Image (cartoon, rainbow, N blue to C red):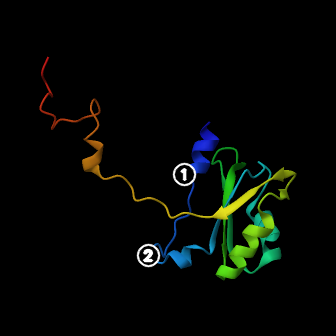
Amino acid sequence: MSLLFRILFASYGLRNENHPRESRRYCAIIWLSKRTISEGLQEAFAKYGKVDHARVVTDRVSGYSKGYGFVRYTTLEDAEAGIKGMDGQFLDEWVIFAEYAKPRPPPPSMQNNNAVPGYGNYNSPTYGRQ
């Protein structure tokens, strides 16, 4: 369940979030093997175009892949070819899935954190009543 949660909310920190076309150069890759490394990811996706950067997200303690990563291509056309070429293919003996990465959502504000009942909502009209 936690892997599925991480995959659904995994995103790459896009620098050009105001340019939706620009963000289409970024690919999110899911269901990677624990043995997959960034160099292997880059090598596999480079068959479909010029890769600017590839990164496998790893566990800080074990160093193994967490099961997902990101690839950034030079052009939109290369990114499209990479997704079409690698989606559903084997990499390190695992079937992987590739899609366009989605921009990271903005962090929640401190005001929203106080709006949850039971979690420090001191502004509530019922706070302190028994």
Q: N-terminal of the two: label 1 or label 2?
A: 1
Judge left or right: residue 45 versus residue 130.
Answer: right
What's the residue at 81%, 52% (across, down)?
Answer: 95
Identity of the residue furthest to the top in this view: 130
Name the quarter where the C terminus is drawn.
Answer: top left
Rendering coords of residue 63 (x, y %)? 70, 49
Give the numbered dot on residue 9: 1
Q: Nearer the viewer, residue 27 or 38?
A: 27
Quote the CA–CA distance across marks 1 and 2.
20 Å
The amino acid type of the residue labelled 1 equals Phe
Rendering coords of residue 97 (x, y %)? 73, 57
Judge whether 70 appears above or below 52 on screen.
Answer: above
Rendering coords of residue 49 (x, y %)? 76, 79
What's the residue at 87%, 51% (across, down)?
Answer: 93
Judge left or right: residue 123 versus residue 55.
Answer: left
Check disc 1 and report its element: helix, strand or loop: helix
What's the residue at 54%, 63% (across, down)?
Answer: 102
Judge whether 106 appears above or below 5 on screen.
Answer: below
The amino acid type of the residue labelled 2 equals Asn
- Disc 1 residue crowd, few under 14, some 14–19, many 20+, Cα 10 Å: few
Check disc 2 and report its element: helix, strand or loop: loop
